[in-house]
Image (cartoon, rainbow, N blue to C red):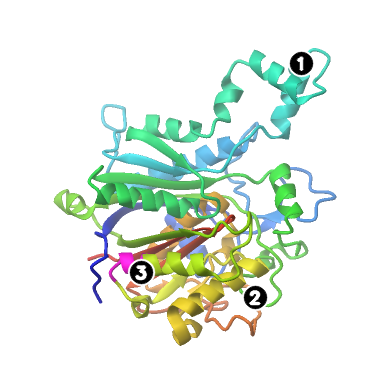
Amino acid sequence: MGSNTAGRPVAITGIGILTSLGRGRAENWARLAAGTSGIHRLTRFPTEGLRTTIGGSVDFMPLEPFSAPALSHAMAREAAIEALAQSGLGEPQAGRRRFPGELFLAAPPVEHEWPQRFGLAHKHPGGASSYDDLLDAAKQDSGALHDDFLFGTIAERLADEFGTSGSPITLSTACASGATAIQLGVEAIRRGQTKAALSIGTDGSIHAESLIRFSLLSALSTANEIPQGAAKPFSKNRDGFVMAEGAAALVLEDVEHAKARGATILALIRGCGEAADTFHRTRSHPSGDAIVAAISAAIADAGLKPEDIGYINAHGTGTPENDKMEGLGVQRVFGPRGETLPISSNKSMIGHTLTAAGAVEAAFSVMTIQNQLLPPTINYTPDPALPLDVVPFTARKATVEFVLSNSFGFGGQNVSLVIGAAP
């Protein structure tokens, strides 16, 4: 079962999560295991005339005024607090937190949204009639608006609050970003750069403009009539993903460091694999080679063979293209066993949390191992072209030691993680 190419396992000692299902590990897992959907009609902004009027927005954290960076920061902060409390690292001392490691944050691309643009236009003498006018108005602004919409601002604020070391890293690899944040933390620990890492994925991007952009790509489900039934991964009648929000934080540690301080190790990151195909800005290459390469690399990095994987936490967005390519990749890596190996999609219940998805689903993968229970895929109609065991409708008890968690982003950015049971 071993491999000479395997990397050292890295411990997970803390998890924090919030999604459209609710706040915290307990509430999220209970609702996920029960097959409950967090998708609902959007009320944050008017939706009249839009093709898609549903989503997995996090409405229990109201912010006035709303902005995607502000919500992304608030969710990341709350997830980090829960993860740190579980790990026992970074607890407040003399009124200040000090986390003994580095921060890797997956955050959504940011730009001024229409409410901010209108606000700037009103500040311009006579109103703004061009983008240059908006820039002139921005120069007269106090600077807060500029700071709020810098790509690295969220990570800097989190680093200041939690006392992380080194330069806080902000990254974006599309829908693979959350998994990339974990991979970077694992690699930093393995090469001895740090003994611990705080890896976070967050995305609070549901606003009118982002919804319209994904609609123009024909990427979103338009099954608005029954919101809870709109996310249909691997289903014959799938018609697009449901945009959602959420955040997850994982505290990663060198295994010996965690043992020395008596920490409870929840699970291990055993392997990481990544591959890009640079074929198209949204589509995967028809060969599926990069998907196969990412999965295979993660399994090899873990020192395992395909037959050791007991469950796959699928990327499973519910778009015709993604699900077809993920199914193809699974069949190529796992052969005939690919038709019977359990593979389910959390997105059928929480929607697609975009930049946060890889971290959210890694957190759910850990809980899958801890509870020895496979979350279901709801809203499923079998697709003869995708002969997969998607754990339909109802959670399933199982003995699982190793989980493969897939994250495949626009532009062919693919990351897979192998997560194993604690020693």
Q: Which residue is mark 2?
A: 235
User: Is 263 or 69 nearer to us in this picture?
Assistant: 69
Say which residue appears at 72% left-offset and 43% top-offset. Answer: 209
Q: In terms of image quadrants, where is residue 20?
A: bottom right
Nearer mark to the viewer, of 2 and 3? 3
Q: Which residue is mark 3?
A: 299
User: Is 132 or 26 nearer to us in this picture?
Assistant: 132
User: Is 31 or 369 nearer to us in this picture?
Assistant: 369
Q: Is residue 2 visible?
A: yes
Residue range of the region highlighted in magenta in the rendering: 298-303
SS assignment at label 2: loop
Say which residue appears at 31% left-offset and 27% top-offset. Answer: 95
Tell which circle, 3 or 1, labels the residue nearer the N-terminal end: 1
Q: In terms of image quadrants, where is residue 239?
A: bottom right
Q: Quadrant of the C terminus?
A: bottom left
Say which residue appears at 54% left-offset and 77% top-offset. Answer: 390
